[in-house]
Image: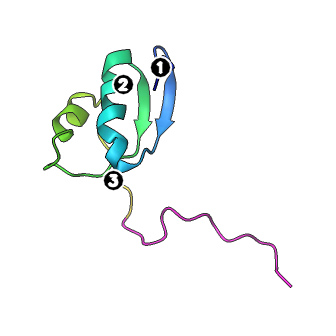
Amino acid sequence: MSFPWVGLRLYAFPPFSFLPKVLEKIAQDGAEVALIAPYWPQRPWFPLLLSLLVDFPRVLPCQRDILMQPMSQQTHP
């Protein structure tokens, strides 16, 4: 968080507990960030998230394995 994000185009999927700090950094540095974040309107950081939107949010499909790597094509002995 000590590195300046000014003028950078970034991707972030931070731990949810770290989202407030990430949102503050985005706002402070004016960075463009493709951010993966939960839809949690009751959280105190949610209005800041909405204020930083530059496009419509995308909803990821609800799949149990969405965060898993695809299985390797290798066979194991």
Q: Position of residue 35 (x, y in %)?
A: 40, 39
Residue 58, can we see it?
no
Q: Are marks 3 and 2 in contact (CB under 8 Å)?
A: no
Q: Position of residue 58 (x, y in %)?
A: 34, 47
Task: State the SS at label 3.
Answer: loop
Q: Give the mark, 1 or 2, whose residue is nearer the N terminus.
A: 1
Task: State the SS at label 2.
Answer: helix
Which quadrant of the structure image shows residue 64? bottom left
Q: Give the mark, 3 or 1, whose residue is nearer the N terminus.
A: 1
Report the residue marked by disc 1: 5
Report the residue marked by disc 3: 59
Q: Amino acid at mark 3?
A: Val
Please name the predominant secondary structure of the magenta segment in the image.
loop
Segment tinted magenta in the rendering: 62-77
Q: Position of residue 14 (x, y in %)?
A: 43, 44
Q: Amino acid at mark 2?
A: Lys
Q: Amino acid at mark 1?
A: Trp
Which residue ends up furthest to the left in the rendered image?
42
Q: Nearer the viewer, mark 3 or mark 1?
A: 1
Report the residue marked by disc 2: 25
Circle 2 Cα neighbour tier, 10 Å, few/some/many (<14 / 14–19 / ≥20): some
Q: Give the mark, 3 or 2, whose residue is nearer the N terminus.
A: 2
| Residue lying at 36% horizontally and 25% vertically, measured from the top left | 26
Q: Nearest the camera: 29 or 64?
A: 29
